[in-house]
Each structure stands twice: as structure tokens, then as C-alpha cells.
Image: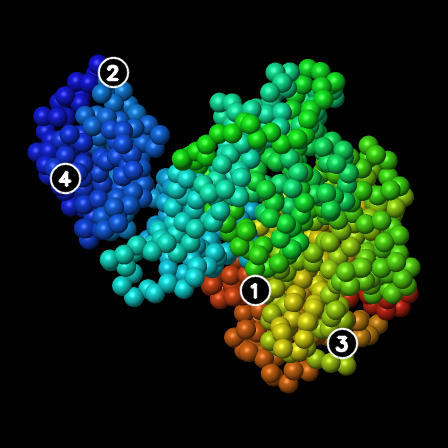
Amino acid sequence: MAAFSIFVFLSGLFITSSGDLYSHSIRPNFTASFINLVDNSGAFLLSPNATFRAAISNYPDQQLPQFYLSIIHLSTNTIIWTANRGRPISDSANVLLTANGLIITNNSDQIVWSTPSLNSPVAFLQLDDSGNLILLDQQNISLWESFNYPTDTLWNGMTYWQLSMDNRAFKESNVPVSFMAVNVSGLYWVGDDGSTIVFKVPLAPIDAAGLEFIYAKLGSNGKFTISSFDGNNSVQNLQIPVENCRIPSICEKIGFCNRDKRPETCLCPSAFHSGIDGCVPINPLFTLPKACNTSNSYGNETNGQVSYMKIGDAIDYFSTKFIEPLSLRISLLNCQLLCSRNCSCLGVLYGNSSGSCNPIWNNVGSIFSSTFDLGQEDFSGYVKAMTLSSNINISSKTDAGHKFSVPGSVLLSSLGAFVLVVIVIGFLWWKRTKGHSRAAVVRLGSKASFSMEIDLLSIAGLPVKFEYEELATATDNFTTQIGSGGFGTVYKGVLPDESVVAVKRITNLGVEGKKDFCTEIAIIGNIHHINLVKLKGFCLQGKQRFLVLEYMNKGSLDHVIFNNESVLGWKERFEIAVGTARGLAYLHSGCQHKIIHCDVKPENILLHEENLHQNLQVKISDFGISKLLTPEQSNLLTTLRGTRGYLAPEWLTSSGISEKSDVFSYGMVLLEIVRGRRNFSVQTCAPLSGTELKRLYFPLLALEMHVQKRYMELVDPRLNGRAESEEVERLVQVALCCVQMEPRQRPTMSNVVGMLEGNLPVEQPRIESLNFLLIYGGRYASVLTTSTDGCNEQNEYIMAYHQSSNDC
């Protein structure tokens, strides 16, 4: 530290006069304090457009002489970024710019804040016109930017990039969220291609004429606001929440916010009194546990130590608006047992009318009285307590004697809280506009054992559990069969809410026991994408398992594309190709658990049409179900899948199976979409010539026409040439790229989507990687034309060469 003090002293010999205000940038060997800059109100750096300044300043509403390195919007005097949040310095403490970065020290020359270690020496500190404070090296390469470390404010021109760390940040798009930004029309979550809007929180219309500045801020009072400035006046365009009592910690932990009084007052529930950080139990034998912050940790608290203290009836809690219930239609006791098995659960809000179990995760905030609006749930609240005695009687009457003031400021202004609130706002908006939820709901069955039901309920993300009798009633005792296959039989059903569903009976399960089955189902049930069939629920009945899926009224692609009675138009074919690619891309790289489908074929591509004026909905089915099968059943299904040539070559060798195996299958499906027929169709039992084989095995013909650039000759002749030639060429080239011999040469499904949508250049397939198609087609022809059973389509070639693989 002595050496550092000498360095500071020597640096001070080279600083310019304290009153200087620099424009755009400054060089190292700069030292300043508020006292040195008092004539400039602490400012030392101005953006070229004079919109922003970097300054050593205190907060406008702060009385204490505490100072921070901040970026300030000049016209509104709004602090939009602070370096040393929570670690203020005095008016004589220093801010230094050295070759190693920015440093803030206190009066004892101790480092209070600094930029992280940099890759090269600093040449400049720059404040640009967007309000970004940047450290640059001698080549003008950015070493550090304040935009990468946001505090409590977003503004137009700024983007927040840390959301790219969450690979689950998807809605109904294959594009991952890369950054978040704000402008006059709302908050935006933008994809990594820089243009796709994955999610938006719109604002009321703002007149953009003359608008200079718009910013979103999480205030110290816990409210999230969006404001705009037109050069003369500031206008608040959005404030959430409107009511103070809906601020998560307005009354600190377990405090009850009385919304009927102005200003609001806080009091502790019965059996609690005011403590250091909120309400605590009056009885010293009770303590409130801290969360373990591991959402899937169960059983960390032994039986007999956990009890539940009531905090009130007819109450509400901020998280009930956007966090789905842990379960529905269960008793209060079972709800509390579920909470007891998870050390991150600190309490529950129990819905007295619906039997909903709403956990309080990780931290307990404030509670407030329910409004009893139409459809409003009547909640009773309970918090988990650790006790040394199980014989203590806790009164549940409200005690108005333990009052305390509503805090003047609720410090929720950390970066984590800011991101949480923004995401919560987006989720609330989405729920209100969409009017539906992706609930993870379990209903207790009367026939299951109590302990088993509790085990099942503890599985996060489990969809609705139906009783066998419910499905029997919905399907009229399984009378209307709409499909069948290797996974089982599918029936049409109608639930009590009049929604139509498809009920799939699965047999030959490989998972052992109900809990293993439910764990896999929870994974599948939490995969949501516009191009994937939604799993609505499941049923366990003895050894039988049922899946309840959304109903697709147009059936599977094979019934539509190979139908001689009607011809699917080119526009619809192209939409099906793109929609299928999007769904597979999401399975491979978009969801939390990567899923390899293992069975991509027209039979597993389902279509739905609400009316003649809407586009076809395209959805992939049966994804993830291969995990539920026995090894023997999986091997058998693999053989059956190869019947019409959708298997990748690696299925027939000892090579590992990967998502590129799905890419191969997709390429084969793409060729069938173009032609409107199976890739291999037996028309004769006689030996085939090379020319006849090309006509019989369509991928060979597609390769030949690709070499000759005669793509339109590949289109389904029933269309009579009514197809977009550029799209035909694109589909054929992409299909051939997908069916190349080596998996590493095939594109990813995300790149396939980009090529089909025109966002990426179409790759050119390598001809040498497609020569195997001649052998592939010849093997099919050899088996199918010499079969002892005539021209049947049992694929003995695949049967002979297939080796077991459990990779899927």
C-alpha cells in the first residue's frame, strides 16, 4: 500500500488543473476528487454531444456528504450509472485513471472500487454520445465498458448484454435472447441475430417528435418506472407496481402492509413482533430458517423440526401473480409437506377455494390484504419455522399492536434485483395478454399411496396428472382411434372444459417405477415451442402409461403430402419445411435439456388449421419419448424407423448418434415434401437398371438434378409447375446438405432455419459426400425386389446392419 501511495503522489504531479472539464476522452495519470472539481459540480468528462457527463457526485435526494463515480444525463440531471454503488467516498477521496484501469480510493488510499484486470494498458477513457464509459487501448480497442455493468437504469442507446448467459431465454422463437434494450415503444428482448424481437413489453404510445431521452429505472423505493424527456419536460410513462403494498419488501420480512390507510402502515402478524430485518417469532423457541438456494434439494430438514406459523387469512403475496402453483387440488397438509421437502421453500400461500399450493422461494417478503376481485383467490399464508418443541400452540389472530413504519426506501437496486423485476414485468405482461399459463400442476389421485404422491409432487415441472377414469370418460372408453405406431395407440378425447386432446397409450416402458417416468415426463412437459406438440398431462394406471397431448385436426404430414385425393400447395409445403426445422432446432439447442428426436419422419409432423384464413400450424410430435422405452423396444423401433429410409448412416454402424442424425432424417423428409411421394417406392419386382434406380430412389434423382441445376423437374408434378423456383432450389440444396454421409458435414438445425429463411447463405453440398446414396438406394432395391415375400417393404437391410444404440 505504501508503494501505491507513492504512485498516487507521483501521478498527482502530472494532472491538469482541477477545474478542467474534458470533452470525449482523457488519458491516464488523471486524478480528481469532488473538492478539486467543485466548480464543475464534480464533472470531469463530457460526451461530444454534451448529453452525458462523468462526475464525482452525490445523489440529489441525499443529505449526507457521500459521493460516487457516476454518469449523469445532463438535461434531466438523472444518474444513469454508478461505479461504487453501496460504497460511497468522501468529497476528498480520489478517482484515478491509470494504465491499469479506473480506480476509486478512500481517504486512507484503500481501493474502494476498480475495473477488473485488463488485457492491455489503457490509452484513453472515453464517454461516448450514448452515455457509455469506455476504456480503450492504443489501437482504440475496447478494454472495458460501463454498458456491460448496468446498475439500476436502462436508457435508449444502451443495451444490456448479460441476458445472453441464459440459454433458456426463449419464447416462441429459435433465436436466443442476446440483449435487452428500451426505446419509445417499449422494452425489448432481442435475439442474437440483432433483429428478431423475441419478447416485448409495449408502452402506451409516446410522441417521438422532439424526444431526447427515455429511460427505465428501478428506484430505491422498489418501483420500476419508464420515463421520457422531450427537451423541456420529463413524463413518467409507466410505473409498476401502482400500489405501494405490492412492492415485494415494502414492509420487510413477513410485514403486513395495510393498503386501506394512506399512507400505508405496516404491522406484524400475530405471534410475531418487529425485529432487525422485519417480523420475527415472539416465542424464542421458533426461528425462521434461511433458504439453501438449491431449488431441488429435498429432505435437508428432518421430521419434527419443521412447523408452520400462520401469517394471515385473506392475504396476497406479490409472487402469486407470476409464479405458477406447485400443485392444485391438494390439502393444506400436503402443501406444507411439499414445502418441507425443499430447503429453498420458506412458506406457502394456500388457496382455500382451489387447493392451490403456492411456495415462497428463497426470501420472504411482505404480505397485503386480498382485493377479492372477480376470480381472485382466497389465500391463507404460512411460513416455515424451525422449533425445539412440537407442542407449542400458535395463535392465528391478527395482532395490530406490533406496528412499524413503512420504510422510506426499499433497497432493491442491485443488478440482480433490477434484472429480476424487469423479467417479472415481462412475465406479468405476457400472462395478462396471452390469458394462459404453462402451469406445472399435479393433482392427487385417490388410489395412489400418500408417500408416492408426495414423491411425485416433488418433481419440479410435472404437468397435469389425470386419473384413468378421467381419460376413459374423455375418450368414450378409448373408442375413437386416430393413430397408431411403435409408441402405442392414439385416441381422440374431449376434456370437461371442452378442449379436444389426443390421448396416447404407451407400452413397453423402460423406465423403472413411477418416479423415473414422471421425471422424464417433467422434462418433456417443460419444453414449449410453437412448432412442438404440447404435452398437457399424463396418467399412470398399473403398468400402463398415457400421455395427453394437444390435438392436431389435420393429422400427420404423410396423410396430407402423399394423399392422391388432394394436393398440398407449394406455399404450405415451404411453411411445413420451415416450421419443422424450427422445432428441431429448438429441441437441439433451445431447451434446457437437449433432445435428440431419433424418429423424424412425416408421421411425426402434425398439422392443425383453425380456419381457412389462417396458416397451417406445424408441430413435431413424439420428441423425447424414446427415453421412456425398454432397450429392446428402442432397438425394434429403430428398425421400424428405417423402413422407408429416414435413418442416418451412423445408425447402421458403431458410430455415435447425435443431433446430426436428426438432421439427416429431416433432409430425407424435405425431399419428400418437394416431390410429394416417398423417397423409395416399389413399382416392380424385376432387377433395376441405374436409370430405373434413380427414378425409384428419389434422393439419387435429386442429386443428379442438383448437379445439372434442373431443380424444377423435382417438384411434385401434381402442382403443374406452381412453385417458387428459388425456394425449390433452396429446399433441394439444403436437403442434400442434410443427408451428407459424415455427420460433421451436415449443418445444424439452427443453420438450416437460417438458410431456409434467407438469413444465411445456402451451403453447397459436397458431391463426394453424397455418392453413398447410390449404394444406399441399391441396397434398398436389392432387399425390396428380392424379398421372399414379394415386394413387401420390410427393410431387411436395416435389420441386418443395425446395431443397438442407446444414445437416444
Query: Marks 3 and 2, Cα distance to the nearest angstrom?
Result: 82 Å
As shown in the figure, which amino acid type bears the numbered disc 1?
Val
Image check: 21 left or right of 393?
left
Mark 4, residue position: 40
Residue 664 figure quarter = bottom right
Image location (x, y in percent) of residue 684: 82, 74
Image location (x, y in percent) of residue 447: 89, 41
Q: Secondary structure at mark 1?
A: helix
Q: Secondary structure at mark 4?
A: helix
- Among the two numbered marks 3 and 1 on one chain, the one whose residue lies closer to the N terminus: 3
- Among the two numbered marks 4 and 2 on one chain, the one whose residue lies closer to the N terminus: 2
The residue closer to the viewer here, 308 or 370, is 370
Mark 3, residue position: 563
- Which residue is drawn at the image coordinates 80% and 37% (left, top)? 453
The residue closer to the viewer here, 414 or 317, is 317
- Which residue is drawn at the image coordinates 53% and 44% (left, top)? 260
Q: Is residue 370 above or below residue 494?
A: above
Q: Are marks 1 and 2 in contact (CB under 8 Å)?
A: no
- The mark lying in front, picked from 1 and 2, is 2
As shown in the figure, which amino acid type bears the numbered disc 2?
Met
- The mark lying in front, picked from 3 and 2, is 2
Can residue 554 be seen here? The reply is yes
The crowding category of the residue bearing disc 3, from other C-alpha atoms within 10 Å (few below 14, some 14 to 19, many at least 20), is few
Mark 2, residue position: 1
Q: Is residue 272 above or below residue 640?
A: above
Q: Secondary structure at mark 3?
A: loop
